Image (cartoon, grey):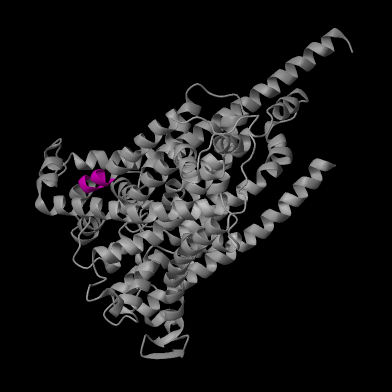
Amino acid sequence: MSGLTISRFIRFEGGMQGIDERIAGLLQWLCVAALTVFVALPLAAIFIKAGQDGSGAFVGLSQLVRTVAEERIQAAAWNSLKLAVMTLMLVLPAAFVFAFALTRSRVPGKPWLRLIALSPLLAPSLMPAISLVYLFGNQGLIKGWLGGATIYGPLGIVLGEAFYTFPHALLILTAALSVADARLYEAAVALGAGPLRRFLTITLPNARYGLVSAATLVLTMVVTDFGVPKVIGGQTNVLALEAYKQVLGQQNFNRGAVIGLLLLLPALASFVIERRVAKRTQGAMTGRSVQYRAAPNVWRDTALSAACGAVALFLVALTGVAVAAAFIKLWPYNTELTLAHFDFEHQDGGGWRSFRNSLLLSGTSALAGTLLVFLNAYLMEKMPQSRVAVPLSRAIAIMPMAVPGMVLGLGYVLFFSAPANPLHGLYGGMTVLVASCISHFYTTAHLTLTTSLRQIDGEIEAASRSLGRHWWVCCLRVTLPMVLPSMLNVFRYLFVSCMTTVSCVIFLYRPDTELASLAVLNMDDSGDTAAAAAMATLIVGSSCLVSLMLNALGWWCERRLQRWRTA
């Protein structure tokens, strides 16, 4: 090949790579624009609205000061904090014991225990409240167990929130306790340390980050949830309910924005605490570490089995009662089986249309969200990084982690309902509902795929570019098959989360876009508790069915990927 031909070839290759990089850069900025419009700007709208009065005039912090000074708001804030702490005191020890049993013992039936423990993830937060009403309400089956106390109030809220938050705390603590260096325990035994001393000096310190993360997550979830207090709270007012009343009940968006900022404070405080603890936490495992495996211990395993059995019974009872009530003619007087409660066309809540809307929302959000997250994560991790676009995209992608769903939904109302907004036409439609769900659950999906992509050697993309291949060819033929199992996990996470969410979409729906989780709330409000239980049962069933299908598909992908690597 002549020198002139070689030089032309080099210029052609360099030009092609330059075009590829410009395309990647354009896509990066498009991702930044999408995150800005659907995450950053709605949050900014809350801060702007909180500084305005009813006429739109800027009043600064005066409205915030007046709102916080009101006795009603102070009482609601105190109730939210008190109930969150009470729930934490119940959930954190139970989740830690359960996680310890799954990772540090030889308790029999671990797969079944784990399945039961994670089952609340498939149910809307309203479901445990409905079950508690059936068990301990005015016509409850075992209301006498309360000794004259009422379930409508703090007791019901704490029990319902415990069901709702338990699996989230368990996932974090299981991850924290699953990593341990057996050499530390062997050295402690050699030095004469007993089981209690080993637990206090090795296990607890190593699990400190998980405990703090679980605690902050539980506190934030309880403070910002309004589903359980709405159904079973009685006269107990909390901040999330106050925001709901101000926005939907009184159409007072300025006051709702102020309360939204108050709801944002515990989430931000939790995020800061978690980050500070993370910086001080060192890795428990090194290249020389030995994986810890629990030795047989009859007394330990028996005690843990009893504790896990009690927790599992509580979770199964709250799920099973709602499911059973959906098929019982008149609880608890007539226990004949019936399907009449599934005749939603004669009930409030949007009928079967709300369930179809939820399936459409969840499927669209899961598909579009998975593709968007993968594209953004791939461009950030595998392509030449822009000095501005990539850091900005990373910062916005982490924002939803510290923003409660109700606050984000309120931001969508304030931003998209503004007549001057060019996107005003989207307000109330399915597009905004999909965008809000993707934005709300974006961070977890982003971190999942980013972690998966970082495990793939960057030499693959470098070799592809050196061979003159477009970056999207390598992405589709090599990278995508390798991260497909993680993408299926993200799809499942988004689908189930969208099926069960309430707070994120409570401000955004219209009668023709009502969702199944909201139908549960509206049917319970109108007194159709059995129909609400039936709709909640459909949500659990559909979430479970999709999860099983994706698990089977993920298993098949893993097998094909192993064969591909072997070949």
Give the position of the C terminus as an image quadrant: top right
User: In the image, is residue 444 above or below residue 23?
Assistant: below
Q: In the depicted view, which residue is nearer to us: 307 or 554?
A: 307
Q: In the depicted view, which residue is nearer to us: 8 or 357?
A: 357
Give the percent coordinates (x, y) of residue 391: 47, 27
Residue 261 forms part of the magenta stretch: yes
Report whether residue 342 is seen: no
Give the percent coordinates (x, y) of residue 414: 28, 47
Give the percent coordinates (x, y) of residue 381: 59, 30
The picture quadrant where one finds residue 160 is: bottom left
Q: In the depicted view, which residue is nearer to us: 246 or 497?
A: 497
Q: In the depicted view, which residue is nearer to us: 22 or 370?
A: 370
Asked if residue 71 lies left or right of residue 434, the reply is left
Q: Which residues are magenta?
A: 258-263
User: In the image, is residue 310 above or below residue 523?
Assistant: above
Give the percent coordinates (x, y) of residue 434: 45, 53
| Identity of the residue furthest to the front in this view | 192
The picture quadrant where one finds residue 211 is: top left
Residue at image location 48% in from the left, 68% down from the top? 539
Residue at image location 41% in from the left, 88% down from the top? 329
Report whether residue 263 is seen: yes
